[in-house]
Amino acid sequence: MMPRPMGQRIFVAGLGLALLAGAAASFGQAAGATAGSQSKPPTPGMPEARATQPKTSDTLPGLTAEQTRFFRYFDRDGDGQIGREEYRNVIVQFFESMDREHHGYVTDAEIRKSFPAVHQGEPLNPKLRMSLTQFEDFMMARFDRADSDHTGKLPPDQFKALQGMPE
Amino acid sequence: MRRKSYWTRAAAVVMAALSVPMLMIAQSVVRCDSEGPRKTCHADTRGGIALRYQYSSQGCWQGDTWGYTASTVWVSNGCKADFSLGTVPHTQAQTQSQGSSSGDVLAGVLIGALAGAAISNAVRDSNNHHDDYDDSWHDGDYDYDGYRRRVQCNSDDMGMHECRVRHIGYAEVARQYSGSPCIYGRSWGYDRNYIWVDRGCRADFWVR
């Protein structure tokens, strides 16, 4: 595969950042939103689904409370590590949220529209057209690189390093 | 005439030689997609299998919405993906990860510099939204882009339970708590207005 131009690589890195922002926002709102399903009394014989509020009081070693909440957004099975499958599912969902017209790729304009806080300035690559498979390749490459011991899972410290999460 | 025939045969040999590796590549990948019910695709998985590309935002979770036998791979609940068969090829992702070009280093630095602010802002914003919406939740106002809610449904006694959730278009497991597996169509599922769980499946579900 031909290496991508630096501008595009940087831009793609921005996608990762956009993913982080979107995922964190999604987590926070989704966790709070579940209270809504409690508002209506359950039908006899069919209980209302219980709203859930993931525990946010306990922080993971090496992570702040906010980082822990973000980490747990990915951690589907709650084993304290992020697997490739857990990571992949989140990034695919966010690709779709950016690809608003469902044409199979995202453009510079779509990304900036989805995450205006990330790309307020001039577009880095106005001609960008990134497919889902390209996006998966790039993001999974970052995962594999962070997975230095080749376990297929990232504990909190590796996950933090992967995303450049701050101290 | 003889000269032309020679070149024609030579071209045919070259094309045949090229087609062999292409055919091998084609045979090493199987695309399997479902629109809801389980779909089974023929695949020789004896040499190994790995999900290569996921095309659906509907989750592909091994053991829940995709899996395999020696001769098939199956998907369900909207999972769509390419699967690599045999010895898992050296993926583009893995190839890229070996590189350390200056551009990639710069990209990493850029992420590091910006991610902190973005995450902090996102979490703070989401907390603010939570406060704003605390007393006014109603269907459709749940979360990011308004397309996901998170609810819990438990088969506490190993039996069938139905949990009422309004306006379900799609659901998937967000977090499994049970040791008993949650497998779509077998131990959990959903209809328009409820999620059902069975056989000890206890989980949070994303609903949209």
Image (tube, coloured by chain):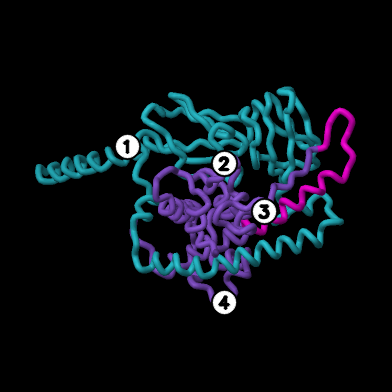
Chain colours: A purple, B cyan
Q: Amino acid at mark 1?
A: Met
- Marked residue chain, label 4: A
Tell me if mark 2 has few (under 14), some (14-19) or many (20+) residues whose alpha carbon lies within 10 angstroms of its own.
Answer: few
Q: Pick whichever, A115 or B26, lies toward us.
A: A115
Check the image and name the residue furthest to the bottom.
A122
Separation of marks 1 and 3 at Cα, in angstroms: 42 Å
Q: Are marks 4 and 3 on the same chain?
A: yes
Q: CA distance from mark 4 to mark 3?
A: 26 Å
Dot 1: element: helix
Residue holding disc 3: A27
Q: Residues within 10 Å of mark 4 (few under 14, many from 20)?
A: few
Give the residue number, with chain letter if any, for mark 2: A79
In front: label 1 or label 4: 4
Q: CA distance from mark 2 to mark 1?
A: 38 Å
Chain of the residue on which disc 3 is drawn = A
Q: Which residue is labeled 1 in the image? A: B24
> Which is closer to the viewer, label 2 or label 4?
2
Residue A139 left/right relative to B201: left
**Residue at disc 2, secondary structure:** loop
Quarter containing the N terminus of chain B: top left
Q: Amino acid at mark 3?
A: Phe
- Is the same chain shared between marks 3 and 2? yes
Q: Is residue B170 above or below residue B42?
A: below
Q: Residue at x 74, y 24 (%)?
A: B157
Task: Give the extent of the magenta segment.
Answer: A23-48
Task: Place residue B43 in its image quadrant.
Answer: top left
- Residue under pointer 4: A121
Give the letter of the chain under mark 2: A
- The answer to whether residue A4 is above or below residue B42 is below
